[in-house]
């Protein structure tokens, strides 16, 4: 990626982090509720689609950490 592209990506990550700061805990609570429902459904009815939905919810819940790791990697790779 070009330095300008990396700076643009950093700006996107920063904008997401700032926007999600206040609402993320509430959003995650809803994701947790949805995940519990899906796990209960998976226990009673084996379904690859349900399993995939659970994995997606978990990936979304990990988004802040994933973006922070990406941000740190980009920052380390940018020239001073």
Image (tube, rainbow, N blue to C red):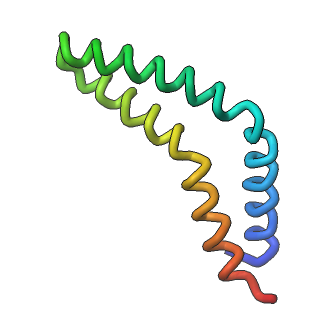
Query: Can you say whether 38 is above or below 14 in the image?
Result: above
Q: Quadrant of residue 7?
A: bottom right
Image position, residue 57 (x, y; %):
46, 32
Tell me which residue sits at (77%, 77%) in the image. Answer: 3
Query: Can you say whether 79 is above or below 59 in the image?
Result: below
Tell which of 79 and 37 is nearer to you: 37
Image position, residue 1 (x, y; %):
67, 74
Image position, residue 12 (x, y; %):
77, 53
Q: Is residue 74 left or right of residue 47?
A: right
Tell which of 43 and 56 is nearer to you: 43
Q: Quadrant of residue 22?
A: top right
Tell me which residue sits at (76%, 68%) in the image. Answer: 5
Tell me which residue sits at (29%, 28%) in the image. Answer: 51
Image position, residue 25 (x, y; %):
64, 32
Numbered marks: total: 0
Q: Is residue 19 left or right of residue 69?
A: right
In the rendered image, the quadrant that contains the C terminus is: bottom right
Q: Is residue 18 left or right of residue 64?
A: right
Tell me which residue sits at (65%, 25%) in the image. Answer: 26
């Amino acid at each position: 990626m070009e330095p300008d592209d990396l700076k643009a990506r950093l700006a996107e990550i920063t904008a997401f982090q700032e926007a999600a700061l206040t609402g993320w805990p509430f959003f995650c609570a809803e994701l947790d509720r949805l995940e519990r429902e899906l796990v209960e459904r998976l226990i009673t009815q084996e379904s690859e689609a349900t399993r995939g939905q659970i994995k997606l919810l978990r990936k979304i819940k990990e988004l802040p950490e994933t973006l922070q790791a990406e941000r740190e990697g980009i920052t380390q790779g940018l020239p001073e």
